Image (spheres, grey):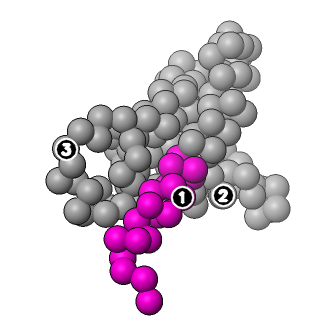
Amino acid sequence: MRHSTQLLPRIDAGLLFLRLTCSLLLLYVHGLPKVLHFNEELARIEDPFGFGPWMSLLPAILAEVVCPLFIILGIGTRLACLPIIGVLLVAMLAVHPQWSIAEGQFGWLLLIIFTTIALTGPGRWRVGMADKREFRHGASQ
């Protein structure tokens, strides 16, 4: 059986891959279109709680543009996952409750992935990893 320190590089590589690919996917598919076509999105965004389109679109942009950038860099990763999880829960439970599992599978998978990242943290491969003592604590830091 391998010593746990031999597994850490693979765990860190997996967490980096998960952070990068899922954040880029969320940013590309959902975030950038909201920014690039802001006025169109403002006109068609769902407003499940009656706060108005601005108060529906701005949290979505935070969760789908700003937060993925922090997650990609590994800065405040766990905290950055929370708005994404919140927006996904609102989308899946309040905006599209009629969707079957098959229709909502992309949203549910994103929810699973970003909850996993929130639970595990970014791993050791991230920007600002200057303190070498953190390496002793493994992927959970």
Image-quadrant location for residue 20: top right
Check the image and report above or below for 79 versus 109. Answer: above
Out of 91 and 105, give the one closest to the viewer: 105
- Say which residue appears at 36% left-offset and 51% top-offset: 124
Query: Which residue matches tag 1?
Result: 14
- Which portion, as a residue range, is magenta? 1-19
Can residue 49 be seen at all in this image of the molecule? no
Query: Residue 140 placed where, x, y %?
Result: 33, 62
Residue in the foreground of this view, choosing between 60 and 131: 131
Which is more foreground, mark 2 or mark 1?
Answer: 1
- Name the residue carrying label 2: 109
Task: Pick whichever of labels 2 and 1 is earlier in the sequence.
Answer: 1
When asked about the image quadrant of residue 57, the answer is: top right
Q: Nearer the viewer, mark 3 or mark 2?
A: 3
Question: What x and y, as percent, mark residue 99?
Answer: 77, 56
Whichever of callouts 3 and 2 sits on the residue coming sooner in the sequence is 2
Q: Secondary structure at mark 1?
A: helix
Left or right of residue 117: residue 106:
right
Residue at 22%, 54% (x, y): give it: 134
Q: Secondary structure at mark 3?
A: loop
Which residue corresponds to the image point at 41% horizontal and 47% vertical from the top-left?
Answer: 125
- Main secondary structure type of the part rendered in magenta: helix
Q: Nearer the viewer, residue 113 or 96?
A: 113
> Which class describes the residues within 10 Å of circle 3: few (<14), some (14-19), or many (20+)?
few
What label does residue 131 carry, if any? 3
From the viewer's perspective, is residue 114 above or below residue 1? Answer: above
> If you read the primary sequence from the N terminus, does the residue marked by circle 1 or circle 3 appear first?
1
Q: Residues within 10 Å of mark 2 (few under 14, many from 20)?
A: few
